């Protein structure tokens, strides 16, 4: 689903250089120390950074020079990127094309029900817990219907119980929809059911990559701090 071919990206003095393939339906966790290049990679795939070399392909389509909106990618930021002046229904409806937002109430309601927020449509983001806000952002991604989702530390603000619940919800929804996920995380613990593949970055290079089950069974020394 995602192919990074000879990708080279610079951000200030930092340089990311790697090739990486992500299979359709895979849920890849990007790990590594601060400054290793995780967010740089995510921003390049999203279209926020222009590569100096290489190609980015999504489902076989070269999107290297395309703007964010034309890449077929949904993005889940750490804070959920919810608008405080809109209620939950209004925030989720932003996942629909502008022409369908007024007529898409049934779709919004279904999306909220799928993330366990049935009946929360008239609440404001400020009235919700961190876990509930994350679910609202996830419901919006479902309505966007894109084949790929990029997630930047989606569990950072959640306690262990909420983290496990959110991870399970994403795994269930991704399994049912075939969504391909690339997720930056600082900790893989408790994400066994969600993460199918792992990539460890070191100084802008791909140090370790493979199936999560294989890497957990026989972890390379460099990966052990994140398992």
Image (cartoon, helix red, strand yellow):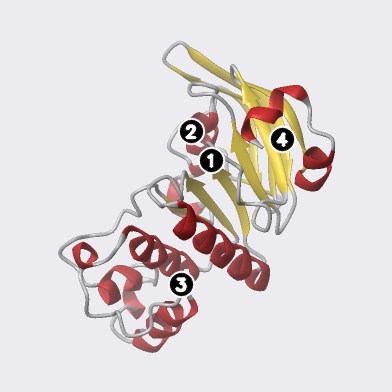
Comes first in the chain, label 4 or label 3:
4
Using the image, tell me which numbered label, if any, was put on residue 143: 3
- Which residue corresponds to mark 4? 20
- Residue 6: % across, % down: 70, 26
Q: Nearer the viewer, residue 21 or 121?
A: 121
The furthest residue to the left: 85
Residue density around tag 3, few if under 14, some if 14–19, many if 20 or more, within 10 Å: many
Q: Secondary structure at mark 4?
A: strand
Circles 2, 1 touching at the beta carbon (< 8 Å): yes
Seen in the picture, residue 134 relative to 184 is either above or below; the reply is below
- Which residue corresponds to mark 2? 39
Tag nearer the camera, 2 or 1 = 1
Q: Nearer the viewer, residue 54 or 217?
A: 217
Mark 1 and mark 3: span between their CA atoms?
Answer: 22 Å
Comes first in the chain, label 2 or label 3:
2
Comes first in the chain, label 4 or label 2:
4
Residue 164, by quadrant, is: bottom right
Residue that appears at 28% across and 59% down: 82
Seen in the picture, residue 210 relative to 88 is either above or below; the reply is above
């Amino acid at each position: 689903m995602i192919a990074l071919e000879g990708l080279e990206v610079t951000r200030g003095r930092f340089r990311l250089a790697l090739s990486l393939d992500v299979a359709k339906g895979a849920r890849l966790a990007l790990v590594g120390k601060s400054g290793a290049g995780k967010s740089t990679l995510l921003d390049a795939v999203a279209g926020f950074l222009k590569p100096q070399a290489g190609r980015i392909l999504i489902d076989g389509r070269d999107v290297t020079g395309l703007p964010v909106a034309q890449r077929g990618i949904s993005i889940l930021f750490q804070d959920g990127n919810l608008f405080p002046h809109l209620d939950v229904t209004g925030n989720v409806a932003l996942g629909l094309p502008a022409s369908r937002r007024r007529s898409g109430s049934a779709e919004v309601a279904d999306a909220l029900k799928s993330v366990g927020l049935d009946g929360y449509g008239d609440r404001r983001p400020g009235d919700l817990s961190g876990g509930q806000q994350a679910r609202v952002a996830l419901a919006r991604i479902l309505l966007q219907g894109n084949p790929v989702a990029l997630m930047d530390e989606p569990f950072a603000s959640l306690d262990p119980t909420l983290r496990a619940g959110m991870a399970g919800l994403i795994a269930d929804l991704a399994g049912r929809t075939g969504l391909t996920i690339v997720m930056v995380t600082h900790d893989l613990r408790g994400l066994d059911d969600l993460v199918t593949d792992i990539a460890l970055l070191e100084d802008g290079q791909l140090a370790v990559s493979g199936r999560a089950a294989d890497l957990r069974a026989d972890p390379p020394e460099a990966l052990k701090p994140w398992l």
